[in-house]
Image (cartoon, helix red, strand yellow):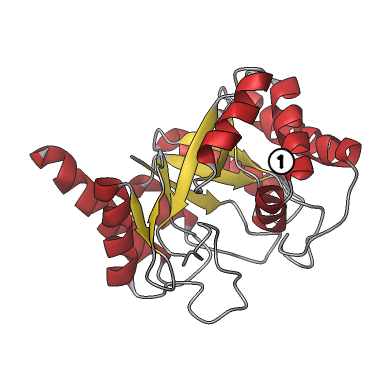
Amino acid sequence: MKLNCDLGESFGAWTMGQDEEVMPYIDMANVACGFHASDPSIMARTVTLARKHGVQIGAHPSYQDLAGFGRRSIQHTADEIRGLIWYQLGALEGICRAHGTTVEYVKPHGALNNDMMRDASILQAVMEAVAAYHHQLPLMIPATIHATEHSALADRLGLPLIFEAFADRAYDDDGRLVPRNQPGAVHNDPDTIVAQAMTLASQGGLYGLSGKWLTLTANSLCVHGDNSHALAATRAIRDALNQRNSTA
């Protein structure tokens, strides 16, 4: 079970997250590509930091929404979705290439990520965009109770998938993330976050907000880097995963 985190989300003189502190404890860095956060200097700095710690670099594309941090749904055609993903992938790939590395996977951000899990046509467009860019480039999507259907769709395009679960977010009974504007949607207590992470890692699922058990088979765990508890939670999850691996 790999640990991933959304990073490189600062912009100009504005700082978001604790990238330098969090990076040593993760396996995969989801790097903002300039549409919801970041800029060329931030992207280059994040790529350099990831290389230093041997962390995989993933593109974290979003709707073009700097003001809303990519958390607002924007209506697009399939062609427009493919274009915005290619544009952001190309930007990060260029910076990676200049630093002797490459983009190793794609994880959509925010509203784009949520929308594609609710609308099959958006998911199809995102999958087509990634598959067309590079047929061996994996797409990271949330693990849900519909994972078998999502895998079948990806298989038709020859697209590898990485399924992720969230250690610091609550789930509804359909296995989707509870919207951030609802009470209890985001876990702020590191102990709660670690407990959810270990339940996912050891039992292949978790309990939804109503108490219903959800089977979610995930390859990667996400802890968000844009809040005050990110470092403590990430350290604790890394220690717990290391301990579990050493006794397995």
Q: Residue at x 28, y 55 (%)?
A: 199
Q: Position of residue 71 (x, y in %)?
A: 71, 63
Q: Which residue carries the number 1 mark?
A: 123
Q: Quadrant of residue 46?
A: top right
The answer to which of 64 and 199 lies nearer the viewer is: 199
Q: Position of residue 50 (x, y in %)?
A: 48, 39
Residue visible at 36% across and 46% down in the picture:
24
> Where residue 132 sits: x, y (%)?
75, 21
Q: Position of residue 1 (x, y in %)?
A: 33, 39
Mark 1 burial class by Cα count in 10 Å: few <14, some 14-19, many 20+: many
Q: Is residue 29 above or below residue 65?
A: above
Q: Residue at x 60, y 22 (%)?
A: 155
At label 1, the amino acid type is Leu
Is residue 215 in view from this perspective?
Answer: yes
| On screen, residue 20 above or below 99 | below
Instruction: Judge left or right: residue 114 versus residue 52.
Output: right
Residue 139 seen: no
Compared across the picture, whether 100 is left or right of 35 comes to left
